[in-house]
Image (cartoon, rainbow, N blue to C red):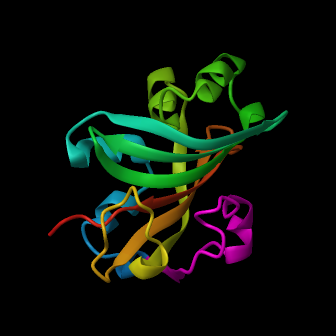
Amino acid sequence: MARTDEIQDLLVCDLLRGLEFTWVDREGVELPYRELLCHDHDMTSTLSGFHGGEVVLKIFEEREDPNCYMREVLLKVGEKPVEYGVIRIFLENFPEELHSLIVAGKQPLGAILNESGLIYSSRPGGFLKIPGETFEPDFFPPTGGGFLFGRYNELIGEDQEILARIIEILPREKP
């Protein structure tokens, strides 16, 4: 399981600064969030299948330096928010032809990877349990006092290079 200090470089966005969470194992993640988070493939296709539609990307903030592209995003299916995340993408570990697609910000990274045929895997480093009253972005529905769940994840290329590090937080699903 990841340590909190391993994800500090992702907790830089205003919304995540000082985020209160507890690390939990997969059994500590409630259903249906366990099905959505506890796997070794991409979130884009997982969320698309669960919510029955195409996942679209909304970027709140982005930064780029020569080796890294970082963005704070909201993924939606239709008008429904399905994931909030912060992703650090290590561009130097991608084929050059994917760089412009990634930084264009038109598609989630998972969609780009799947369409490109690039071989990769997802390696969750830990699961987050977040008190709903401490993380209440206006784009998520109210939690009703419940918990939100998320994960710290790494996307790993065929050569075992880290393609991206991600914090992914899911909204509460209506019962």
Task: Please state the horizontal and vertical placement of residue 117, each as a whole percent of the image.
Answer: 49, 24
Magenta part of the chain = 1-25
Q: Position of residue 170 (x, y in %)?
A: 39, 61
Please state, as top left, top right, bottom left or bottom right, where the C terminus lies in the image.
bottom left
Q: Is residue 121 left or right of residue 100?
A: left
In this rendering, does residue 42 appear at all?
no
**Residue found farthest to the front:** 138
Q: Residue furthest right?
A: 66
Give me the residue at 60% from left, 66% from top: 16
In the rendered image, the residue lying farthest to the top is 97
Q: How many marks?
A: 0
Question: Residue at horizontal 38%, vertical 82%?
Answer: 28
The N terminus sits in image quarter: bottom right
- Image height of 93 relative to 15, above or below: above
Residue in front for this viewpoint, 125 or 89: 89
Residue displayed at 30% across by 63% down: 141
Looking at this view, is 69 or 124 the one in front? 69
Q: Which of the 4 image quadrants contains residue 63?
A: top right
Residue 12, position as x, y percentages in the image: 70, 61
Main SS of the magenta segment?
A: loop
Tell me what residue is drawn at x 46 percent, y 77 percent. 130
Say if 40 sits above or below 57 in the image: below
Residue 4 point in image, percent of width and height: 67, 76
Tell me, yes or no, whether the highlighted magenta stretch contains residue 19.
Answer: yes
Asked whether 122 falls inside the magenta stretch, the response is: no
Image check: 68 left or right of 10? right
Q: Quadrant of residue 145?
A: bottom left
Q: Is residue 44 visible?
A: yes
